[in-house]
Image (cartoon, rainbow, N blue to C red):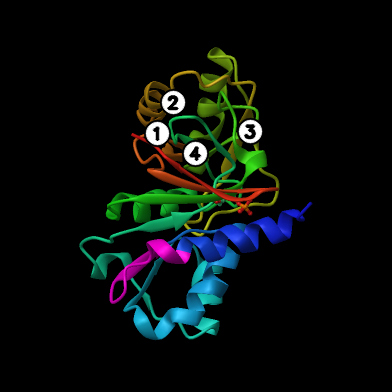
Amino acid sequence: MPTADELKTLVGRAALEFVVPGSVVGVGTGSTVNKFIDALATMKGRIAGAVSSSAQSTERMRSLGIRVFDANEVTSLPVYIDGADEIDGRGCMIKGGGAALTREKIVADLAERFVCIADESKQVAVLGRFALPVEVIEMARERIVRRFAAIGGRAVPRAGVVTDNGHPILDVQGLAITDPPALETEINQWPGVVACGIFARHRARVCLLGTAAGVRRIDYD
Ligand code: 5RP
């Protein structure tokens, strides 16, 4: 049985198949993406560079000699490769365990295709067992906590965490997210929400899932 770390390495390497030679690649954040970045470094001479979703990924890529572009310098990306905290049967995800959700959504929005890399523990029937991360403007924090309480969610500020954008994160427990696009739309309309960790509008089109039997590719409609 491969370890979790070995599964991450497997899917990180497998994602190279989606990298278009000569292009700029969208790169996510997290321990699985770190494996992808290490693999990407082996073909750095064959890509133009990357757009990064966090200071952490930028630092790792630069240290490996991968050129990192500002998101404002590119008009589109053929692919965005990132991990997830949960992924459902349609490719909708919860993201933000690493507090990078806002920039992840910005880079995903620039990309034609989201390829998720994850181990099979992330696959769920219904999103919501993993506490939903939501980046908020500080002065709206308690108002948003009360809004979540009104729909059955227990929102707790993530202790000691400020995002790359300078904002706090709320982690929301107790939500069974049966309609991810509807809840994402609703939360996005609350004043003070910077970004919500539901990725339904920016769902994965492909998932490379690390399993005991190897990498399983799942394509969503
Ligand atoms: C960071 C994220 C990550 O993609 C998510 O937390 C998964 O991370 P890991 O690969 O370490 O399990 O959304 O904000």
Mark-to-mark CA distance, 3 and 2: 14 Å
- Viewer-closest of 106 and 18: 18
| Residue type indicated by callout 1 | Ala
- Viewer-closest of 166 and 16: 16
* Residue 106 position in % (x across, y down): 35, 52
* Residue 197 position in % (x across, y down): 49, 39
| Residue type indicated by callout 2 | Pro
Mark 1 or mark 3: which comes first in sequence? Answer: 3
| Residue type indicated by callout 3 | Ala
Residue at 55% x, 62% y is 12
The magenta segment: 16-26
In-image side of 201 versus 65 (left or right)? left
On screen, 207 above or below 27?
above
Mark-to-mark CA distance, 2 and 4: 10 Å
Mark 2 or mark 4: which comes first in sequence? Answer: 2
Mark-to-mark CA distance, 1 and 4: 9 Å
Residue assigned mark 3: 131
Q: Residue furthest left?
A: 75
Mark 2 or mark 1: which comes first in sequence? Answer: 2
Are the residues at dot 2 and dot 1 in contact (C-beta closer than 8 Å)? yes
Q: Residues within 10 Å of mark 2 (few under 14, many from 20)?
A: many
Residue assigned mark 1: 200
Q: Residues within 10 Å of mark 3 (few under 14, many from 20)?
A: many
Task: Identify the image quadrant of the C terminus.
Answer: top left
Residue at 36% x, 56% y is 107
In-image side of 192 versus 23 (left or right)? right
Are the residues at dot 1 and dot 3 in contact (C-beta closer than 8 Å)? no
Residue at 54% x, 13% y is 150
Residue assigned mark 4: 197
* Residue 202 position in % (x across, y down): 36, 41
* Residue 34 position in % (x across, y down): 59, 66
Q: Residues within 10 Å of mark 4 (few under 14, many from 20)?
A: many
